[in-house]
Amino acid sequence: MAMRALVKHPDETGLRLDEVAVPTVGPDDVLVKVHTTGICGTDIHIYNWDEWAQATIPAPMTVGHEFSGEIAELGSNVSGFEPGEVVGAEGHVVCNRCRNCLAGRRHLCHDTRGIGVNLPGAFADFVVIPKSNIWRHIPGIDLEIAAIFDPFGNAVHTALEFPVLGEDVLITGAGPIGLMASAVVAQAGARNVVITDVNPYRLELAKRMGATRAVDVRFEDLQDVQDELGMTEGFDVALEMSGKSAALDDILQNTINGANVALLGIPSDPYPIDWSIVIFNMLNLKGIYGREMFETWYKMNVLIGSGLDISPVITHRFGVDEFDDAFDVAASHESGKVLINWVEPT
Ligand code: NAD
Ligand code: ZN
């Protein structure tokens, strides 16, 4: 049987919408009929076929890792799931053999492979997922919200890394992940949630996601914002979600002694930081990667089930034939989350 798929071919930029064979379902696999997919920064690197992508993607290959769908078929060794169930997937396939995997710390696996990066992806009518990576959604979930559980998981993992109840939280970077993190820390009981960016479109979205203040750091000083909010010693918790050196500098300059700082943003190049501030202020820095398997996923189900609304982060929707336009708007940053729908609306 044939299906549509967005395939990365070698020696060219962009993707091609190809007809390919529906992937074979192994005994431990689940075949998912894809409903909605989301475009991630990683997909834009792949689309642009930059140095990292050329060195990483085994092209030609179907790409994409943010998706929601329904179970179409179960491998012969798979039990506990039913065809028709609404599912998503953890995109990191772990080795199950390294020290961390054996200790149950799968998010720290020594040898992960990524769906849509190292393994065939979800920008297609069907995707094959190992049963160990399938995540069952809460009944009745909106399939667009389900499609962004991967980046929502990055936001939840980072936002819940440190206790935020009653704390003043600074988030640098109002991209889709920073925006969703602002909603999570607000729900988790933060006193003030201040989010920064240099992009007015995204700062406008931040106001709809529950931020106390959305700050354009080109024009406003965070010290003034602290004064305005009656803060005296700095932010208690900071989440770095831009990957930019200037943003980490804002964090170093505006956090309380002993602050907890979670770092998710990926710098495009190494940058220097003022270590004397980290040392004298006894800051606690923690790198964050991916999602905890599957504690973050559990928290996501509970947060959505208890009414957390992250829908304002979804700003654009496209059909499969319009995928080039979808990638253009995602790369422009005049957008929040950009979705491609694989099933015609009924
Ligand atoms: P994004 O690139 O859409 O958002 C980053 C935002 O930071 C942009 O809106 C940009 O305008 C803003 N920014 C630029 N300079 C800034 C500054 N000086 N101060 C404050 N904000 C500034 O990215 P995203 O999809 O929301 O992801 C956030 C970050 O997390 C990215 O760096 C991404 O590469 C990274 N990421 C990490 C993981 C992980 O597992 N560690 C997973 C996914 C994404
Ligand atoms: Zn491992």
Image (cartoon, grey):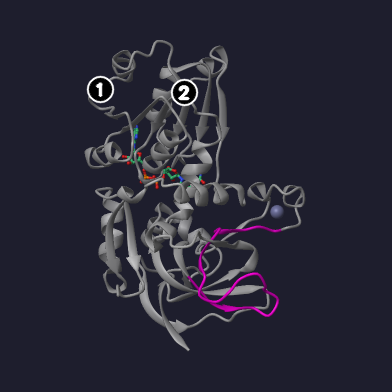
Q: Is mark 2 within 8 Å of ligand 1?
A: no
Q: Is mark 1 within 8 Å of ligand 1?
A: no
Ligand 2, seen in the image, is in the quarter at bottom right
Residue lying farthest to the bottom in this orientation = 1
Residue 109 tag number:
none
Above/below status of 18 relative to 159:
below
Verify whether residue 78 appears in magenta: yes
Instruction: Give the residue number, with chain letter if any, for mark 1.
Output: 220
Give the mark nearest the N terminus, 2 or 1: 2
Q: Which residue is mark 2?
A: 167
Q: Identify the residue at image location x=34%, y=39%.
A: 174
Residue 63 in sight: no
Image position of 284 with respect to 119: above or below: above
Q: Is residue 224 magenta?
A: no
Residue 323, position in %: x, y? 30, 68
Q: Amino acid at mark 2?
A: Glu
The residue stretch that appears in magenta = 70-95
Q: Secondary structure at mark 2?
A: loop
**Image position of 57 (left or right of 325):** right
Task: Residue at 41%, 18% (x, y): give it.
Answer: 254
Camera-side residue of 328 and 286 = 286
Say left or right for 33 vs 108.
left
Secondary element at tag 1: loop
Q: How many discs mark residues in the rendered view? A: 2
Residue 338 vertical placement versus 310 (above, below): below
